[in-house]
Amino acid sequence: MDQFDALFGQFTPTARAFFTGNLCQAIGFENPDGLGYLHILKSGRMTVSGAGHDAIEIAEPSILLLPRNTAHGFDTDRETGADLICATIQIGGGAGNPIALGLPDLVVIRLAEIANLAPTLDLLLDEAFAARDGRQVALDRLFEYLFVQLLRHVIASGVVTGGMLAGLADARLARAITAMHERPERLWTLDDLAEEAGMSRTRFAAHFRETTGTTPVDYLTRWRMTVAQNLMRKGKPIKAVARAVGYESPAALSRAFSKMVGVSPRSWASALRG
């Protein structure tokens, strides 16, 4: 069972490296395009402000992941500075992407904690501070791979304590969540999902809510609406979208979509086209 396969089938993370070098001044980050950020502190020390936290002092090599467009800033020593590599990250699918929803505003991981990422980081750092042809493309792809590895680490280490990623960290719930991701068109019942998890209906419903913060039915509906939005971005007609996400008619999809998103699918698609 590949927990990420269906997710990344809908949303392909894309990264764009935009800074490599020594930062010796205060700087702020806020992307008007709604992109997140990945920063690697190679050496030096800096103070991180914003991102929903009090100021944080980072004094050893670390990775900082901000999955959403969260305003934040760095302040470094004016004399020694800090060696940084920075990239934007687009997880895909807008605000409804369960990966983005499942991560906190800021994740800080010391490089010493993630020895299994060393080969990727070695390649990334080598590319960042060299001047080879194809450097930009190589850095972008390495950042995308690093993001996948960070998700694996976050799930395995229990860094996230709620949302879909916390559910994927639970072997039983992961089976049910992955089944929903892979087959949103199926007419799932609570009994079906409990069977996927190998649990009783009552225990499954309670454990799912305790772990993820939502009910299985609400999570399934949100996932379906997220997939529906992605299909409409690709220009799929509403009738085909309804079938693809488990609704018998466009009217049934419209009711669920309007309740969760706030507008009808047709209005949402029209606004997307501008």
Image: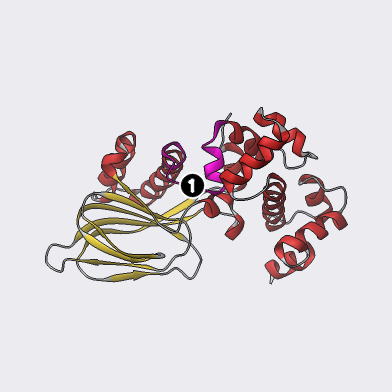
Q: Nearer the viewer, residue 147 or 57?
A: 57
Q: Nearer the viewer, residue 234 or 152?
A: 152
Q: Is residue 251 above or below residue 159?
A: below
Q: Nearer the viewer, residue 215 or 222?
A: 215
Q: Is residue 156 shown in magenta?
A: yes
Q: Is residue 235 visible?
A: yes
The amino acid pointed to by label 1 is Thr
Q: Which residue is mark 1?
A: 161
Q: Left or right of 43: which side holds 189?
A: right
Give the x, y percent position of residue 248.
Answer: 87, 47
Residue at position x 71%, y 54% from top?
225
Q: Main secondary structure of the magenta part?
A: helix
Q: Left or right of 58: which side holds 176?
A: right
Give the x, y percent position of residue 99.
Answer: 54, 49
How many marks the image carries: the answer is 1
Residue at position x 70%, y 31% from top?
200
Q: Is residue 208 above or below residue 54?
A: above
Give the x, y percent position of residue 71.
Answer: 41, 68
Q: Is residue 182 visible?
A: no
Circle 1 SS class: loop
User: Image quadrant for the C terminus?
Assistant: bottom right
User: Image quadrant for the N terminus?
Assistant: top right
Q: Is residue 116 shown in magenta?
A: no
Give the x, y percent position of residue 270.
Answer: 74, 68
What stretch of residues is rendered in magenta? 154-171
Residue 154 image-quadrant placement: top left
Query: Circle 1: is it few (<14), some (14-19), or many (20+) Cα within 10 Å?
Result: some
Q: Is residue 190 above or below residue 270?
A: above
